[in-house]
Image (tube, rainbow, N blue to C red):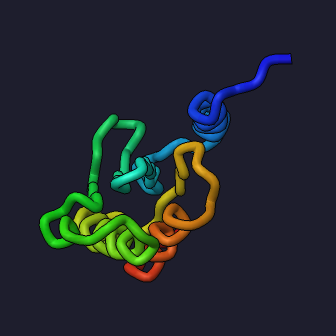
Amino acid sequence: MSKFTRTAARKHRQIRVRKRVHGAVDRPRLAVYRSNRYIYAQVIDDVNSRTLAAASSQEPSLRGRSLSRETATEVGKLLAERATAAGVEAIVFDRGGNPYHGRVKALAEGAREGGLKF
């Protein structure tokens, strides 16, 4: 019986989710990457392999803050603002193998508050 390490288990979940979640032109994929210090989000059109909008907690306006749910919510709102400016209204959410909880959930809620439809 083999056991995955924590990182390998996340990668395995990421691959499993990516089989079903695919960003199209009309509904691009919102991909989330969460590290211990920062959180990153991109709106990706998988058909044309293009990033339409991106935001992270390393933005100059958010740089001095520690990573918390409030910071993740601000990143989600910033991403929604940039995605709306790029003409995106609806997205498919890709949590990147992370549980939909805490900072990942806060980012999604911030994007919803910003006007994106999931």
Where residue 17 sits in the image (x, y, percent)?
64, 40
Q: Is residue 109 above or below residue 21?
A: below
> Quadrant where the N terminus lies?
top right
Residue at (53, 45) in percent of width and height:
96
Q: Is residue 38 above or below residue 3?
A: below
Q: Is residue 61 left or right of residue 42?
A: left
Where residue 66 sits in the image (x, y, percent)?
32, 68
Seen from the viewer's position, the closer of residues 108 and 89 is 108
Residue at (35, 72) in percent of width and height:
71
Seen from the viewer's position, the closer of residues 38 and 41 is 38
Where residue 79 sits in the image (x, y, percent)?
31, 66
Residue at (48, 60) in percent of width and height:
91
> Quadrant where the C terminus lies?
bottom right
Where residue 11 sits in the image (x, y, percent)?
58, 32
Q: Is residue 46 left or right of residue 94?
A: left
Where residue 89 sits, quadrant-wise, is bottom left
Seen from the viewer's position, the closer of residues 45 and 103 is 103
Q: Is residue 37 left or right of residue 105?
A: left
